[in-house]
Image (cartoon, rainbow, N blue to C red):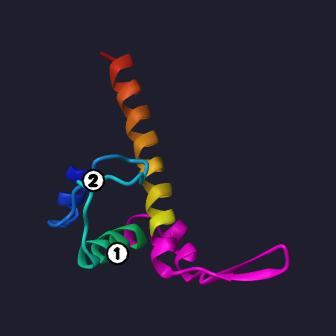
Amino acid sequence: MTLKACQLGMKNTNFTNASGWHDPKQVTTAADLAKLTIAIKRDFPQYYAFFSETSFTYKGKTILVPVVVVVVVVVVVVVASLQLQLQLQLQLAHKWT
């Protein structure tokens, strides 16, 4: 993930896991998250609607969602999708070698 972050121009980001679990060595900046958001909007427009969600209703109660939470959720979904695509490509490549 850190390699992909660098490819996106996220020079102040270091990922240590793909799950989002806390790790003191895992860091990023607001500017780098903005670059990631732009890349997600450009490369995965089908997820763009998630960014506009600022609240949801659960058991009749409206819950406000901080934008950063929405971004993190979308990032996790996209990363999982990318990992699955990569795994499938590697399996196909291995099958043909």
Which residue corresponds to the image point at 27% horizontal and 56% vertical from the top-left?
24
Tell how many labels: 2
Mark 2, secondary structure of its residue: loop
Which residue corresponds to the image point at 21% horizontal and 62% vertical from the top-left?
13
Which residue corresponds to the image point at 47% horizontal and 49% vertical from the top-left?
81
| Residue type pointed to by label 1 | Ile
Residue denoted by label 2: 15
| Residue type pointed to by label 2 | Phe
| Picture disc at residue 38 | 1
Of the two numbered discs 2 and 1 on the same chain, state the one appearing first in sequence. Answer: 2
Question: In the picture, residue 32 is in which quadrant?
Answer: bottom left
Q: Is residue 64 magenta?
A: yes
54 to 87, vertically: above or below: below
Q: Is residue 68 magenta?
A: yes
Mark 1, secondary structure of its residue: helix
Determine contact: label 2, label 1, CB under 8 Å.
no
- Point out the image quarter for the C terminus: top left
In the image, residue 8 lies at what x, y percent? 23, 64
